[in-house]
Amino acid sequence: MLMQGGPNICGATIGVLCLDSRFPKPPGHIKNPSGLSFPVLYETVKGATVAELVNRPSPDFIAPFTEAARRLEADGVRAITGSCGFLALFQHELAAAVTVPVFASSLIQVPLAQAMLPPGRRVGVLTADARNLTERHFAAVGAGGLPVAVGGMESSTEFREVILEARRDDMDITKVRTEIVAAAVRLVSDHEDIGALVLECTDMPPFAAEIQERLRLPVFDLTTLATMVHDAVCRQPYHGINPRPVQSRGSFASDA
């Protein structure tokens, strides 16, 4: 069997465009492959920080990220995502730069989650910084105009100092877990019509199970989205017991 050559590394389905950060990424984070159920490749855009993307998004981001996306495509990935939900702002530019599917942000799931809910219920979005998550971000991923309720981590302490402000690289995971879960509970308490939650920030999925246990709601994040896309671009045969075939009349031996 003749197989196509080209990529230096084979078998990775999802490519990840990574911001430049050094704080810990527990299992469940898209930048921790040990907790993922699919093979990944990473491209770090040097100098692209969380603070810059969240607070000062600029068209200057487009060129280095599209170049990194093209490198991932050349290495053979079948779909590309990013390590920060605020990359939603550049969804169209990134998708246009390559020929494989691009899902720059977990916010792409907002219309999907909304479509699943009954009338009178809406999607809640927990974000790293609600002050900077704008209608432009939602519109760029097809979620513009939806009645989302947004809550953020900008008033937290550990999350804000380490992730948003990059004051240090070491992080107290227990404090961050407590802050994220509390913010999710507060968001749903403030908006009782929330029927599903989308976690914008890629630092939140490690705590999604605890959030769901507290709120009893569907919780979407980048890891759930990346898993779905992986399954879509790398379909596998199903294995199991097939129904019995129809037997034609007279196919059984006579008792006579």
Image (cartoon, rainbow, N blue to C red):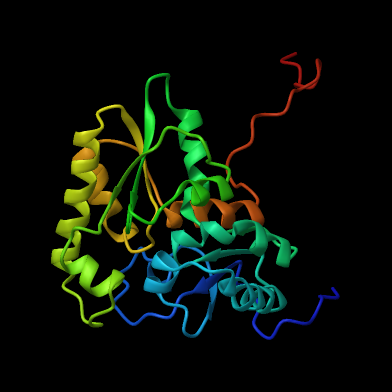
Task: Determine whether 247 is above or below 2 in the image.
Answer: above
Occupied quadrant, residue 32 = bottom left
Task: Determine whether 133 is above or below 119 in the image.
Answer: below
Please indicate, yes or no, whether residue 234 appears anywhere in the rendered image. no
Name the one closer to the observer, 1 or 209: 209
Q: Residue furthest right?
A: 2
**Residue at x 34% of width, y 57% of height:** 205
Tell me the quarter of the image containing the N terminus: bottom right
- Report whether 79 appears left or right of 167: right
Name the one closer to the observer, 186 or 58: 58
Please indicate, yes or no, whether residue 224 appears anywhere in the rendered image. yes
**Residue at x 28% of width, y 74% of height:** 165
Residue 183 location (% of width, % of height): 21, 49
Name the one closer to the observer, 1 or 16: 16
Residue 167 location (% of width, % of height): 23, 80
**Residue at x 45% of width, y 52% of height:** 224
- Report whether 58 appears left or right of 238: left
Tell me the quarter of the image containing the C terminus: top right
Residue 134 location (% of width, % of height): 44, 50
- Report whether 92 appears left or right of 250: left
Callout count: 0
Occupied quadrant, residue 50 = bottom left
**Residue at x 45% of width, y 75% of height:** 19
